[in-house]
Image (cartoon, grey):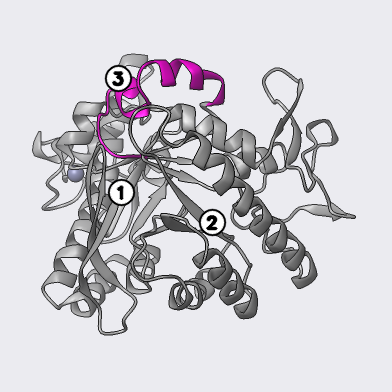
């Protein structure tokens, strides 16, 4: 994998560039579309190409049982039929949040270093070795640590993997964050060592990103960026639960310390104002389930802010004026989409999920394309003000 910086913002952090993987090029800033199980819900690979998606992000935890079959097929790009650049998440977040409702902003109960999730029957326990958890589908005890996560990801064979890390929540105090961070750094070393053994198993090179935690504390963020920055990672994942108002500062602390020549992925955020902050502060790629998930709930992205289709019965308005997605190009109106959504016919509902998802994903993909273009043309701040002043007005 190669990363080339084409242009920097005056703040020295934000940049436009190119990540060149063995399955193709990603022009950054870029949004990676989430296909947790190796396919984007209700969006086909052809739809993905048509909306100019550049990369797909899948999940190591959710694909773990199918990983031998994926390896057999030659890796995720081939197995999924997507045939472009791919990234996998380590699965750490999924196993640690099982049954707990742990989100990017939800708290957990914690005693003596053991994570007690809200439901006692779905306990996930973090130890030095890794995470013991109960499989929510089989009810059987299971375990994933750094080594298991690397073995799984190397069988899935995405172009970019994430090191196994412990995500802390906003409710965790400073002391717990130090403990978790130090464990994450030890897991980073173990992830690197195990990854090295398997990263060429499928006949092409698979890359590994280290993941930065450290909560909202500047000393922890800078320290871990320094420590992980010295390790032989191919890039970095910017992780953690963020308060919106802290996001820019936290990213600045991390990215001022990280080696400039390696790409950075901001994990799990896709709201337009977060993408602007991320791009400005030096994040190169983004991912989030929100565009497709929200589409299925009738939430449609527009340049004048998001709308809920519930309120647009019989509306002849387009989803968003001037949108270049295939749904808008075919002339679908808000009222027509609402009718499909509210129909009792399963086929019509599926058609709605497809049409609405295409629109929302294209909206975010196009936003990152426009940010990149604005950076290359030295008008990023102008574009940001113009876009957000319209988008954020309700
Ligand atoms: Zn559209």
**Res 347 seen here:** yes
Q: Tell me which numbered mark, 3 or 1, is placed earlier along the sequence.
A: 1
Tag 3 secondary structure = helix
Residue density around tag 1, few if under 14, some if 14–19, many if 20 or more, within 10 Å: some
**Res 298 seen here:** no
How far apart in space, not on screen, are marks 3 and 2 (Cα)? 41 Å
Q: Which of 335 and 41 is in front in this view?
A: 41
Q: Tell me which numbered mark, 3 or 2, is placed earlier along the sequence.
A: 2
Image point (51%, 55%), residue name: 210
- Closest to the camera, between mark 1 and mark 2, is 1
Q: Say which mark, if any, is on residue 1.
A: 1
**Quadrant into which the C terminus falls:** bottom left
- Closest to the camera, between mark 3 and mark 2, is 2
> Which residue sits furthest front?
197
How far apart in space, not on screen, are marks 1 and 2 (Cα)? 18 Å
**Boundaries of the magenta span:** 64-86
Image point (25%, 54%), residue name: 302
Instruction: Indicate if the residue with disc 1 has its beta carbon within 8 Å of ligand 1.
Output: no
Instruction: Indicate if the residue with disc 3 has its beta carbon within 8 Å of ligand 1.
Output: no
Residue holding disc 2: 211
**Discs 3, 2 touching: Cβ within 8 Å:** no
Residue density around tag 2, few if under 14, some if 14–19, many if 20 or more, within 10 Å: many
Q: In this view, does 95 lie above or below 80?
A: below
Image point (42%, 39%), residue name: 293
Does 113 sit left or right of 222 as displayed?
Answer: right
How far apart in space, not on screen, are marks 3 and 1 (Cα)? 42 Å
**Discs 1, 2 touching: Cβ within 8 Å:** no
Residue holding disc 3: 348
């Amino acid at each position: 994998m190669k990363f080339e910086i084409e242009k920097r913002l005056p703040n020295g952090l934000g940049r436009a560039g190119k990540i060149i993987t063995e399955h193709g090029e990603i022009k950054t800033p870029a949004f990676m579309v989430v296909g947790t199980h190796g396919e984007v819900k209700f969006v086909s690979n052809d739809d993905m190409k048509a909306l100019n998606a550049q990369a797909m992000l899948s999940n190591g935890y959710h694909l773990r049982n199918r990983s031998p079959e994926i390896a057999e097929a030659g890796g995720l790009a081939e197995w999924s039929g997507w045939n472009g650049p791919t990234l996998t998440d380590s699965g750490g977040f999924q196993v640690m949040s099982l049954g707990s409702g742990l989100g990017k902003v939800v708290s957990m109960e914690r005693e003596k270093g053991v994570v007690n999730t809200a439901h006692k029957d779905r306990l996930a326990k973090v130890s030095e070795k890794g995470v013991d958890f109960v499989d929510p589908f089989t009810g059987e005890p299971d375990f994933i640590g750094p080594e298991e996560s690397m073995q799984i990801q190397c069988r899935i064979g995405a172009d970019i993997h994430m090191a196994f890390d412990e995500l802390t929540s906003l409710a965790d105090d400073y002391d717990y964050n130090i403990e978790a961070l130090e464990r994450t750094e030890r897991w980073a070393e173990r992830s690197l060592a195990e990854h090295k053994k398997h990263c060429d198993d499928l006949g092409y090179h698979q890359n590994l990103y280290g993941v930065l935690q450290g909560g909202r504390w500047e000393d922890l963020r800078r320290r871990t960026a320094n420590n992980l920055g010295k390790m032989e990672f191919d890039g970095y994942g910017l992780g953690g639960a963020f308060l919106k108002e802290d996001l820019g500062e936290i990213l600045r602390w991390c990215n001022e310390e990280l080696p400039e020549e390696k790409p950075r992925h901001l994990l799990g955020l896709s709201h337009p104002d977060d993408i602007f902050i991320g791009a400005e502060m030096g994040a190169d790629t983004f991912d989030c389930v929100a565009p497709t998930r929200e589409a299925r709930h009738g939430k449609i992205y527009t340049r004048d802010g998001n709308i809920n289709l519930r309120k647009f019965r019989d509306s002849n308005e387009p989803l968003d004026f001037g949108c270049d997605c295939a749904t808008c190009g075919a002339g679908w109106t808000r009222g027509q989409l609402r009718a499909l959504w509210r129909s009792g016919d399963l086929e019509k509902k599926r058609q709605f999920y497809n049409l609405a998802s295409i629109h929302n994903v294209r909206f975010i993909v196009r936003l990152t394309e426009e940010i990149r273009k604005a950076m290359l043309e030295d008008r990023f701040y102008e574009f940001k003000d113009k876009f957000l002043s319209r988008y954020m007005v309700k």
